[in-house]
Amino acid sequence: MKKYLITLAAFAVTLAAGPAAAADWTAMTGSIDFSGETAGIIAIVGLLATLLVTRKGGRTLLGMIK
């Protein structure tokens, strides 16, 4: 349960700090149409990849602490 709470806290900090330090990508993505199904699928895959990387990183850090 402790590992789960630490991972959840790390994820919450990542979500809270992300928009404050976000880069402006409008120059590169201004001409891309994000209204299609492909963009939705890419967004879901990106979210899942983020969750997996966060989980793996949390486990790695906890393994170093032990």
Image (spheres, rainbow, N blue to C red):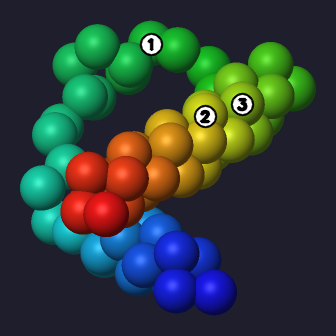
Name the residue at 29% across, 13% down. 28
Q: SS of the residue at dot 1?
A: loop
Whether residue 64 appears in this view of the structure is yes
Left or right: 48 as drawn, with respect to 22: right
Q: SS of the residue at dot 2?
A: helix
Name the residue at 52% across, 14% down. 32
Residue topped by disc 3: 45
N-terminal of the pair, mark 2 or mark 1, is: 1
Disc 3 marks a residue whose amino acid type is Val
Q: Residues at badges 3 and 1 in contact (C-beta under 8 Å)?
A: no
Disc 2 marks a residue whose amino acid type is Ala
Q: SS of the residue at dot 3?
A: helix
Vertical position of residue 4 compared to residue 26: above or below: below
Q: In which quarter of the image is residue 46?
A: top right
Q: In which quarter of the image is residue 62?
A: bottom left
* Mark 1, other Cα within 10 Å: few <14 / some 14–19 / many ≥20: few
Image quadrant holding the C terminus, namely bottom left
Real-space Cα separation, disc 3 to disc 2, in angstroms: 6 Å
Left or right: 31 as drawn, with respect to 26: right
* Mark 3, other Cα within 10 Å: few <14 / some 14–19 / many ≥20: few
* Mark 2, other Cα within 10 Å: few <14 / some 14–19 / many ≥20: few
Name the residue at 46% across, 53% down. 59
Real-space Cα separation, disc 3 to disc 1, in angstroms: 22 Å
Q: Residues at badges 3 and 2 in contact (C-beta under 8 Å)?
A: yes
Residue topped by disc 2: 49
Image quadrant holding the N terminus, namely bottom right
Q: Nearer the viewer, mark 2 or mark 1?
A: 2
Name the residue at 25% across, 28% down. 25
Front-most of residues 35 and 42: 42
Real-space Cα separation, disc 2 to disc 1, in angstroms: 25 Å
Q: Quadrant of residue 38?
A: top right
